[in-house]
Image (spheres, helix red, strand yellow):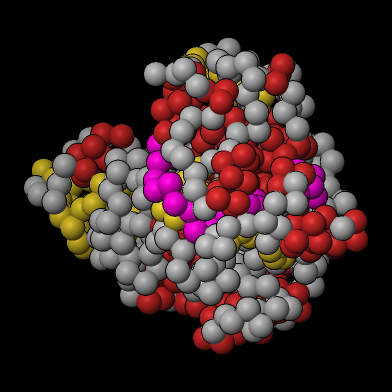
Amino acid sequence: MTPTAATGRRILGGLAQGRIVCLSEPLSFWGGVDPASGSIVDAHHPQCGVDLCGAIVLMSTSRGSCSGSGVLLDLALAGRAPAALVFTEPEDVATLGALVAVEMFGHSLPVLRLSAQAFSMLARAKEARITDTLVQSEGVEIPLSPTLGTDLVLSVRDRALLNGEAGEAAAQAMRILVAMARQQGAAELIDVRRAHIDGCIYAGPANLAFAEAMEAKGGRVCIPTTTNAISVDRENWRAQGVCTAFGEPAMRLADAYVRMGCRPTFTCAPYLLDDVPERDEAIGWSESNAVIFANSVLGARTAKHPDFLDLCIALTGRAPLIGPYLDAERRARLIIDVDLPDGADASAWPLIGYLAGHAARDRVPLLRGLEKASPSRDDLKALCAAFGTTAAAPMLHIEGVTPEADAATLPTAPRIAITPNDLAEGWRRLNAGPEAIDLVAIGSPHASLEECRTLAEALGGKSRHPRVTAIVTVGRQVMGLAEAEGTRARLTKCGVTLISDLCWCSISRPVFPVDAVSVITTSAKYAHYGPGLSGCTVRLGTLADCVGALVSGQAASRLPDWLQGQA
């Protein structure tokens, strides 16, 4: 073997050997990898269909959903995980899944971070072998150094929690937090005032095993904690025909979190609740769209915490002091000038977020050129959700709109542009598909009361086409308000069903119509994840497209009016 100057760092140790799979762009394990097979199912990823099971997987970092940690743990416990994960940039979501796999279930899955030179060398190889000290591949040895950050400063209370003075669940949670903080390079932990749990979505048996294990250890949240959308309508899943093999474990998972003291809010849009975080408030949220909205729009402070770490934070009230908790990490490292055509409507915002996320990757961007468009809260919700789908960054700024945009940019930040042609090309990519529509999907993230009203107004009493199903997913609070003011009744009369508790990223058949093959949505997030989650064609459309499809069963593939004339 020939030594090399290229180096790497061991994030999680262990032995591995296998073929090399090098991904050309980041991947979200949630919605991007099939837990039943270990293959990539993200229809928008260049390597869709590639089998990751038993492979040494190389990618710069992950992207998208915080729930990827649950998918990776599920793969590990089922014997379908990659043999190892190798990154060249910081990564938390998949790393946390691998950490929980070894810490709580004894399943080793090495995680490495290599220098750019070492990563490039390994990417050219066909196979490799990993030990605790070396990566060996085709005559080359890459030395591995231990994890950094071992000088993490712990408070007296942190040490008491580690020693079990608040019970075994809090001790387990603190062990996971400390291990994660050290690999992240955190100097200390920070107090947070509230948490939001994303791990209550039933991604597979691993999520349930984790939650019930923590509950069995006496787990009890010590700060106010809300819950994300779950995988069934808690009150109605049996009547909806959901099979018990799925419905019962999904309910057990939700119930475990509620018994541990979490509020049964069951919404992926916690910023729509009455009690929202204040500016500069340190919180511990999971769920990618909620994290980005909280940091960017509310000016609160939270890292993009992976599933499982969310409960550890809720049990201890502590989080690693990294990323958006720090002023320096909230500054923009990329300027994106958006040339938004006149007359742009609500359909522009998910598209802008989607393209900005692709461009930003792990950099916090400043978006310019949008102030005159005066985005509403729902516009910003759609933008943040789409950005969180394609980016790894935990926040963004919009000049003249978001609270920290004015003094948030590094002087060395590069500039790029999103042109009208870029917008048109992105729309065509997400809007492509058959004109015949079987399902109209609204509410990813959960629809607001205002969005429900707007849909009812747009329908104007018209009834749905007999072939088309229309579903709006909402949080419990919005459902109650829509019921009280008559908006739900207006939508029901038009053939639109409102469903609470679950969302489009967790919906399953038969609530998702069994015979549906073509879907249209106003959400770029669901247009991206939907094909991999449902096996259907999922098209991005305007609200008018969705209403037209609901009434006629058809939606032409076309640019929205505000993009007409673009090449």
Residue 151: x %, y % from top left: 57, 48
Say which quarter of the image contains residue 7. Answer: top left
Would you place residue 357 above or below residue 290 in this image?
above
Task: Please tell me how many numbered marks the rendered image carries.
Answer: 0
Residue 80: x %, y % from top left: 32, 71
Which residue is situated farthest in the right direction here?
A: 484
Residue 446 lies in the magenta-colored region = yes
Residue 57: x %, y % from top left: 29, 53
Q: Residue at x 60, y 51 (%)?
A: 551
Q: Is residue 465 visible?
A: yes
Residue 426 lies in the magenta-colored region = no
Say which of 78 and 270 sits in front.
Answer: 270
Which stretch appears magenta? Answer: 429-456
351 relative to 450 in the view: left or right: left
Say which quarter of the image contains residue 306. Answer: bottom right
Which residue is situated farthest in the bottom direction here?
A: 244
172 relative to 272 in the view: left or right: left
Residue 14: x %, y % from top left: 33, 64
Would you place residue 126 above or below residue 84 in this image?
above
Q: Residue at x 54, y 33 (%)?
A: 351
Would you place residue 88 above or below residue 14 in this image?
above
553 relative to 85 in the view: left or right: right
Q: Is residue 103 visible?
A: no
Say which of 556 and 374 sits in front.
Answer: 556
Q: Residue at x 55, y 60 (%)?
A: 468
6 relative to 10 in the view: left or right: left
Q: Residue at x 57, y 63 (%)?
A: 466
Quarter placement of the C terminus? top left
Say which of 106 and 93 sits in front.
Answer: 93
